[in-house]
Image: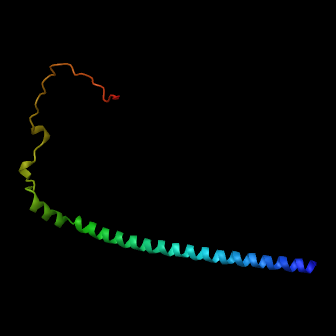
């Protein structure tokens, strides 16, 4: 009787461990699929970043910007005769205020 009980416990433990290994195997497979998906997404994002960096360097090319400025604006290069010193600028005197400024609250709560 003891031998039969021992054998039954052994068979039950073997069945439980095989079921546990079966469940663990499929959990590992699911995790590996998630990992592969994340790695694929990382590679895809790295490629996108590479393309965006190339596009950004093209868009920020000084020659391209200069060409666009010349084509779409009427800006010209500043000449040295257009630059003056601050002391050469005639400053106007501001007129004194005619009335006392009012202090108005910034915000009111409306009902």
Query: Which quadrant of the structure image shows residue 92?
Result: top left
Q: In the shown orientation, is residue 38 left or right of residue 106?
A: right
Task: Place residue 94 in its image quadrant.
Answer: top left
Front residue of 2/62: it is: 2
Q: Nearer the viewer, residue 11 or 79?
A: 11
Where is residue 98? Give x, y as percent: 14, 19
| Residue at (10% x, 59% y) in the render | 72
Q: Is residue 69 above or below residue 45?
A: above
Check the image and tell me how it is coloured.
rainbow
Q: Position of residue 38 (x, y in %)?
A: 48, 71
Nearest the eye: 99 or 111: 111
On the rendered structure, is 102 left or right of 72? Answer: right
Q: Residue furthest top?
A: 99
Question: Hey, which residue is sitting farthest right in the picture?
Answer: 1
Tell me residue 32's x, y (percent).
Answer: 55, 75
Residue drawn at (8%, 52%) of the image: 80
Using residue 104 as the reference point, say whether residue 39 is left or right of it: right
Q: Residue at x 23, y 65 (%)?
A: 59
Q: Position of residue 100 (x, y in %)?
A: 20, 19
Q: Quadrant of the C terminus?
A: top left
Q: Nearer the viewer, residue 33 or 103?
A: 33
Which residue ends up furthest to the left in the rendered image?
81
């Amino acid at each position: 009787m003891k031998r039969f009980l021992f054998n039954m416990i052994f068979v039950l433990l073997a069945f439980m461990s095989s079921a546990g290994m079966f469940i663990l195997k499929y959990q590992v497979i699911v995790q590996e699929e998630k990992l592969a998906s994340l790695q694929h997404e990382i590679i895809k994002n790295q490629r996108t970043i590479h393309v965006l960096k190339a596009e950004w360097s093209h868009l920020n090319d000084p020659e391209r910007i200069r060409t666009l400025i010349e084509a779409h604006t009427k800006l010209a290069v500043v000449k040295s005769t257009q630059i003056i010193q601050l002391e050469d600028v005639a400053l106007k005197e501001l007129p004194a205020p005619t009335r006392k400024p009012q202090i108005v609250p910034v915000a009111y709560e409306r009902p």
